[in-house]
């Protein structure tokens, strides 16, 4: 399933695998002035490239190497010879996704394995005919995560460095302190609009980012206070968040409140 959205000169493509007529766990790609930012997952390649036909792609940038952001890389490389750029830490995973990263069952169901593709290390800027983007390293969600910032427009294409809502669970391999640091770096930019990996474009960007920073800081203070009293991770999770969220069960614990608590305590 795919939804095409228009925001100024940007085209957003919000997509998900179709389950019984519904899309769940959407991911997004953005096209602006010939630049394609991310390429969705393996299951949406055909629909995605069809929707992109009116928009010529001259360059692809992957915000990170997760399977739901690099799915159509290979198609564009093989069919159109498009160059791909990504953080240097992402290059190997993009080249050998089955070797470098074994997907868990829920990831295989939702997004699938992407085909291998060849990316080159990104520099400090990306330029199109009309726009100039600064490359901002924003680790935490993954060590290879980057954002693209267009200062003249106040745009920030932030991949999964910003996820809406109040976090009550974290994936086992995320680092909450790096996520928080990256959010602060994003907040401190002169940004007015964010284009996140969910596809839900948001205005009043600095306000939204500041609210997220404040929530994560408050949560961290509460967790560390209880940890310093000798509370276990599981007890802290029950006290602050109650029962584990549904995501903890269908990911078989890969996402959980306990991992959120653990990262606050152990990754500081």
Image (cartoon, rainbow, N blue to C red):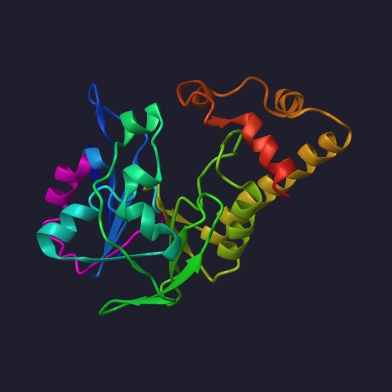
Q: Residue 139 in the image: x percent, y percent? A: 54, 57
Q: In which quarter of the image is residue 73?
A: bottom left
Extreme residue in the front direction: 99
Residue 48 lies left or right of residue 145; in this view the side is: left
Q: Residue 33 in the image: x percent, y percent? A: 24, 70
Q: Residue at x 61, y 47 (%)?
A: 175
Q: In the rendered image, which quarter contains the N terminus?
A: top left
Q: In which quarter of the image is residue 6?
A: bottom left
Q: Residue at x 49, y 23 (%)?
A: 252
In depth, the one of 204 and 125 nearer the eye is: 125
Residue 181 lies left or right of residue 229; in this view the side is: left
Q: Residue 248 in the image: x percent, y percent? A: 53, 25
Q: Quadrant of residue 26?
A: top left
Q: Is 51 colored magenta in this rendering?
A: yes
Q: Which residue is drawn at 69% across and 37% down?
A: 262
Residue 69 lies left or right of residue 219; in this view the side is: left
Q: What stretch is highlighted in magenta?
A: 44-64
In depth, the one of 113 and 7 nearer the eye is: 113
Q: Residue at x 38, y 27 (%)?
A: 105
Q: Residue 152 in the image: x percent, y percent? A: 42, 77
Q: Is residue 67 visible?
A: no
Q: Is residue 33 above or below residue 206?
A: below
Residue 147 lies left or right of residue 96; in this view the side is: right
Extreme residue in the right direction: 229
Q: Is residue 21 visible?
A: yes
Q: In this view, does 183 lie above or below 104?
A: below
The total number of labels drawn is 0
């Amino acid at each position: 399933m795919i939804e095409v959205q228009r925001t100024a000169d940007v085209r957003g493509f919000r997509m998900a695998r179709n389950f019984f007529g519904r899309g769940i766990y959407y991911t997004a790609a953005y096209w602006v002035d010939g630049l394609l930012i991310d390429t969705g997952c393996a299951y949406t390649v055909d629909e995605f490239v069809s929707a992109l036909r009116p928009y010529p792609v001259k360059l692809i940038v992957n915000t990170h190497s997760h399977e739901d952001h690099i799915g159509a890389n290979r198609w564009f490389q093989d069919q159109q010879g498009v160059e791909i750029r990504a953080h240097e830490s992402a290059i190997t995973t993009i080249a050998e996704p089955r070797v470098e990263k074994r997907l868990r069952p829920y990831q295989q169901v939702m997004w699938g394995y992407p085909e291998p593709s060849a990316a080159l290390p990104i520099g400090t800027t990306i330029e199109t005919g009309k726009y100039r983007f600064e490359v901002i390293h924003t680790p935490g969600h993954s060590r290879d995560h980057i954002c693209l910032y267009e200062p003249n427009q106040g745009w920030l294409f932030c991949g999964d460095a910003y996820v809406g809502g109040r976090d009550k669970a974290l994936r086992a391999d995320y680092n909450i302190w790096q996520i928080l640091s990256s959010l602060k770096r994003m907040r401190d930019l002169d940004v007015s609009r964010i284009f996140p990996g969910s596809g839900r474009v948001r205005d009043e960007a600095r306000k939204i980012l500041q609210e997220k920073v404040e929530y994560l800081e408050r949560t961290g203070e509460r967790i560390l206070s209880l940890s310093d009293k000798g509370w276990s991770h599981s007890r802290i999770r029950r006290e602050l968040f109650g029962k584990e969220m549904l995501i903890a069960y269908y990911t078989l614990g890969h996402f959980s409140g306990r991992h959120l608590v653990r990262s606050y305590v152990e990754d500081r």
